[in-house]
Image (tube, rainbow, N blue to C red):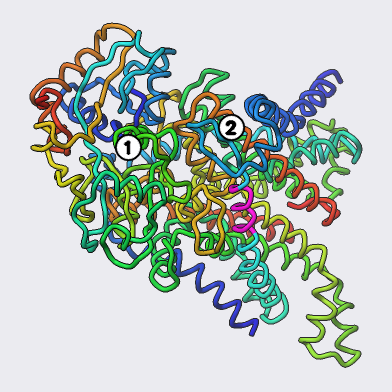
Amino acid sequence: MTKEKFLEKFLLFIALSSISILALIAFFIFEQGLPLIWKKGLASFLLGERWYPSQGSFGILPMVVGSFWVTFGSLIVGVPLGVACAVFLCELTPPLVSMVFRPAIQLLAAIPSVIYGFWGLIVLVPLIRDHLGGPGLSILAGSLVLGIMILPTIISISEDSLRALPRSFKEGALSLGATHWQTIWKVLLPAARSGIVASVILGMGRAIGETMAMIMILGNAVQMPHSILHSARTLTTNIGIEMGYATGDHQQALFATGVVLFFIIMGLNSLALIISGRRRS
Amino acid sequence: MVGSTSVQPFAEILAEEYMAHHSGKKIYVQGGGSSAGIQAVRTGAAHIGMSSRRLMGNEENLIDVLIAYDAIAVIVHPKNPLTNLSREQIRQIFSGKVTNWQGVGGWNKAITLVTREEGSGTREAFQNLLMGKTEISLGALVQDSNGAIRQVVKDDPKAIGYISLGLVNDQVKSLAIDGIEANIENINHGRYKIVRPFLFVFTKEPGGLAKSFLDFVLSPDGQKLLVQEGLVAAKGMRR
Amino acid sequence: MIWVAAFFTLGVMIWIMAQVLREGLPLLTVDFLSDSPRQMGRSGGIFSTIVGTLLITAVAITIATPLGVGTAVYLREYTREGRISRLIRFGTDCLAGVPSIIFGLFGFVFFVIFLGMGWSILSGGLTLATMILPTIISTAEEAIKTIPKSYREVSYALGGTRWQTVAKVILPNALPGILTGVLLGVGRSVGETAAIILTAGSSFLMPTSLFSPIRTMAIHFYILAREGISMEMAYATGAALILLILAINTAANWLLHRYIRRLEG
């Protein structure tokens, strides 16, 4: 019996690993980043428009704005296409076809972000530069690639939500004389709303957290962007691009950027959990 | 070895050559930046620090050895009609004061500025040697390696940037500054002044593998390798 | 109209993969794969990066799998839904959402600096382990959840203890599902870049120990692509990377199908 008890305690210890790691991450990131925020003041850090570490300026507003624009843009691209695909796979094709597509979509989700970034660099950036102007390395390029990258997330979760709806919804609507389209638009999609919204929030989380592909195609200018053809820098790329060389205050400022990111992601995560009501897998 | 990513590719080539002749010895080369390299050597995390700038203030109790000189070239797209810019013009462009090529006698196109990221030794050298007190524009595109800057400039006819002279190839064009071309001869004669030292940094007199490697680097074979890659030999400068 | 959207979407995604594969596949010779990078990647192959990728993934899986499966077993077999299980789930879900660059920062300050492991396979592997832990926990839990109650009841009726039930009944039956999760974790590890650059360095020499720095295939691809050192090498590395991911995913899916069939049969 003591062996059983021991095993139970041991497994509990192991099971607490995920929350412990989370706590460790928060601790170390905060430990490095908070002192800088204290020193410079939260307002001047968050709302400062000048990021010039060699002169001690650590304002991250341009990056916050950059993250916002790029993420927002990626949602504009990813959500309509993603939900459309989900509807397509769930309603408009025989189950066999969607069974083939599922692994295909999973595969696309597994493609490393650096490959997406590379493609964006080789294909999209020159296209934008030559036909729309600007340097090509821009918010537009970033949003497009990021939108494509979050598609698998949105598609698979939205599709799951649609499939989970009771058949009666669909049958009821159809038997009342609604067309297939009307059924989809007015009955199924609204009913799957919470799942779809959860997928969007998850996609948003993925978009905000993306680093490598964005370093490759956003251009990383540190100024407030004023158009989608401008280059920009996100919170993540700010860390990624300067971490290699940073020391002292500069390094701490990057950790502080991490602190801000951490809060944003935690906020989004909690939102997603509340909305979806169930644990996502 | 840890330090400047500008020195890194050359250190890697030297290490590769050295290891080819001394089997069994391993030399690991790591980037991270000049400051990180100097720090790493100080704490003992690395045996040799690589730096693309001179040692400063509280770093002066370390030992530095010059292994080569590296010039910084201002580059533009090969199709760009300009071949020469004055220092003042370069400052105006990189500070964002002049935003169209017309402002320096070129096409009517908006300038795409590219620079290295904060903390880079190359950027620091560019800032100190060319910009002086003028700030580099915050609207400039930022790339985290010289190679990446070269990529941007080679693809965008409107772009201008700066990289190590050793990295200039026929995909980009280097500009003459105040009429002086960026080539080895001008550098050796002290005419082209945008030059910075590549240093190996130690905490004490190097011994063992470090010394052996250092000797190789400073030997005629080692120096020839560096010159082949576009650097200027340590003893080549005539001041 | 939805048809257009769907096909457009799938078309673009396939285009992306095809682009890299088309340019890179022809260059994937046996020599390329078995030779190490030379001249900063201008020539030679990618062997040391393959080794690096495998080693760092192995470290990550070795750490994350026991932790993940253990957590799943605890959640499913040893507790009811209560405060502790909610806490554990909260931790897992949040961990799943943390961006990779934050893991990189954490790995740097914790493994590389604080624990003094330096830029090494160990630092990188441990960081990766924390990143794939939530995936393994989720899939293991799903796998355990789908085992019919009857299996457990029979075991207990025959006098088995909880641990015996777990070890001899639950785990073997959940194995395919768990393996799927492990494979997913492997896939993620292979593609990860941001966190590894900050923790495993970027030296492309063959590693000599777990404390050596390494360069993974994904990082090598990133560096080649950005520096423009050799576009051909970049494409080839990218192709190798995509093929590897394809293989891993296919294996995962095949396992999943076998698992579903077994449960139904």
Q: Within the magenta stretch, is there residue A191?
A: no
Circle 2: element type: helix
> Against C23, is A241 above or below?
above
**How far across and how far down the image is residue B166, in percent?**
20, 40
Under mark 2, the amino acid is Ala
**Going 75% across and 45% down the picture, which residue do you hit?**
C141
Q: Which residues are magenta?
A: A62-71
Question: Cα distance, mark 2 to mark 1?
Answer: 24 Å
Residue for badge 2: A253
Label 1 resides on the chain identified as B
Tell me where residue A90 sits by quadrant: bottom right
Q: Residues within 10 Å of mark 1 (few under 14, many from 20)?
A: many
| In the image: residue B91, left or right of residue A236 | left
Under mark 1, the amino acid is Phe
Label 2 resides on the chain identified as A
Tell me where residue C215 sits by quadrant: top left
Specify the quadrant that holds the N terminus of chain A.
top right
Residue for badge 1: B126
Name the residue nearer the viewer: C249 or A17: A17
